[in-house]
Amino acid sequence: MSRFKKHGDKETPAVSTASLPDIIFMLLFFFMVTTVMRETELLVKVNPTSAKEVEKLEKKSLVSFIYIGEPVQGKLGTNTRIQLNDAFGTVDDISDFIAIEKEAREEADRKFLTTSLKVDKSTKMGIVSDVKQELRKVGAFKINYSVTEQIED
Amino acid sequence: MARKTPEFNASSMADIAFLLLIFFLVTTTMDVTTGINRKLPPPPDPSIKPPDIKDRNVLNILVSKSDRLLVNGKQGELDMLKDEIIEFMTPHFPDDPAFPEVKEETIDLIGTVYKSRGIISLKNDRGTSYDMYIQVQDKIAQAFTILKDELSEKKFGKKYASLNEDEAKAINAAIPVPVSEAEPEDVGSN
């Protein structure tokens, strides 16, 4: 009689999983595109500080990084060390490091090269100042203090 | 009659995709890409004498070894620093000897403005912590953002961040960020 009467005990059809691969592929492509493989392994602990007035770092290919902090490996002591690319360095190595970084970029881009300083919170300014003085000497004037954005309270 | 090609079994596709997905999930590092941009001054030229700057035009900020602030010789608080900088850098007209000198300048798009001659001198000890240094830099940046916002609200009726390139240039010409960093030294034991 009723049009909506249930016809016996028909089973509910199983959810079609045919589109599952598509969904997964979509996610996969997203992560493939956003992934930046870390080229350098961190040898120093860097716990970044935070600030309110931060800017986005643009043109990541034109950025070279200098890490300053305590060595990760305990046996290397707790003295603050400088890491350039994937090895420890000293202040005197910075001029060579910048020269190599400049060499690796195209000539037109060289003047836009930014040096990003990733420095641990508890570091003393002495070593940071030495690095800055050295950067001034070699003409790498554009620097960026890497900090995270502070959430408004 | 052409033989029918057997249908490709796609049920393992999801598994393969999952495997790759998990790999990329694990290797992804959302890196910190934010920071404070600064430009270092070129090395001092010994043949050029540093210009004489009147005392009233300089706001001295000294950060001691134990992360304490000294603003123009008086002990300061980090929370107060922003307001102090804003007060210092706001052009005062007519001339007030307690504040930096002002000069009149005509700038495209915004016309004649009073421009402060104030300079902020930031000096830190070798023992100052990096965290404190960044906090001070941040406060200075915040103060200038507020000053720029104020002027751009007045001249263009919108915030500095939403100005176009030429307008932003005009505001930057009216409010430069005159921060001078002294060579660090050991300024004292406390």
Image (cartoon, coloured by chain):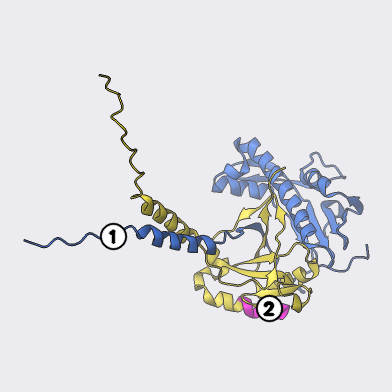
Chain colours: A yellow, B blue
- The quadrant holding residue A91 is bottom right
Q: Say which element carries label 1.
A: loop
The answer to whether residue A97 is magenta is yes
Write the residue at 62% across / 43% down: B160
Write the residue at 65% across / 45% down: B106
Residue B13 x, y percent position in the rendering: 35, 60
Q: Is residue B100 visible?
A: no
| Relative horizontal placement of residue A98, taking residue B50 as reference (left or right) | left
Res. A88 mark: 2
Amino acid type, mark 2:
Phe
According to the picture, the residue beneath numbered tag 1 turns out to be: B9
What chain letter is assigned to the residue under label 1?
B
| Front residue of B95 and B3 | B3
Residue that sits furthest to the left in the current view? B1
Residue B22 x, y percent position in the rendering: 49, 61
Residue B146 x, y percent position in the rendering: 70, 43
* Residue segment shown in magenta: A88-98
